[in-house]
Amino acid sequence: SDVGLITGYYEPMLRGARQRGGEFQTPLHGVPDDMLTVDLSSVYPSLKGMRLRGRVVGQKVVPYRTRAEIANGGAVGRELLWVDSPVDAFFLEVQGSGRVELADTGETVRVAYADQNGHPYKAIGRWLVEQGELTVEQASMQGIRAWIAANPARRQELFNVNPSYIFFREERLPDPSVGPKGALGV
């Protein structure tokens, strides 16, 4: 067949450091040690591809922390890098991978999707439209960034609309001219 669908994306470039300090206050997290991933497909074949993510509290498995819980100090740990912009970090999660230029060494590292907290993705642009804050036409990444710049005190409220949280892994970047791997591993 000569018909197919190809999607493309870009790798955002963030500024960061390996240690928290100065302007670098926003963490990019690796997969937390306390997060469990349960695959029930061997018992329930209809659940193939579905994974339950949670954590153990006492004798129970409970859903893993939401974005709001993580932002409010819910212990996650495993900070890979610290970046200078919470807005860029949020959009990095939406994109799924990107690059971070380390301020102290000038080295550029790639961060790639490693896992997710198990909560469904909710589009913050759609929420802004539903709240009457933006029109559909304004609800682009640029429009959302402009809204955040005009409403900085509501930034975390907006981010918390999306309970999904992405965890990253660091990848070597031997050749910066080579782009990220897509879903097919290419």
Image (tube, grey):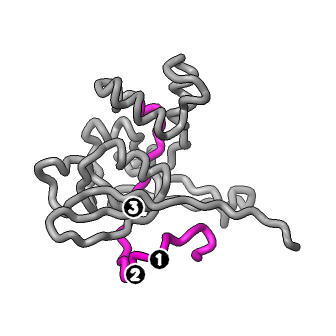
Report helix, strand or loop for mark 3.
strand
Q: Where is residue 53 in the image (x, y as percent from the top left)?
A: 49, 53
Disc with the residue nearer the chain's start (3 vs 1)? 3
Dot 3 amino acid type? Phe
According to the picture, the residue beneath numbered tag 1 turns out to be 178
* Pointer 3 with pointer 1, Cβ within 8 A: no
Report helix, strand or loop for mark 2.
loop
Q: In this view, does 137 lie to the left or right of 83?
A: right
Instruction: Check if residue 180 falls in the magenta segment.
Output: yes
* Pointer 2 with pointer 1, Cβ within 8 A: yes
The part of the chain drawn in magenta is 158-186
Residue at (19% x, 51% y) in the render: 24
Instruction: Check if residue 159 falls in the magenta segment.
Output: yes
Report helix, strand or loop for mark 1.
loop
Q: State the mark number for residue 175.
A: 2
Q: State the mark number for residue 168.
A: 3
Disc with the residue nearer the chain's start (2 vs 3)? 3
Indicate the quadrant where residue 70 lies. Answer: top left
Dot 2 amino acid type? Asp
Instruction: Name the outermost residue toward the bottom.
Output: 174
Point out the frontmost of discs 2 and 3.
Answer: 2
Q: Where is residue 71 in the image (x, y as percent from the top left)?
A: 30, 39
Q: CA separation, marks 2 and 3? A: 20 Å
Indicate the quadrant where residue 98 lies. Answer: bottom left
Residue at (57% x, 56% y) in the render: 51
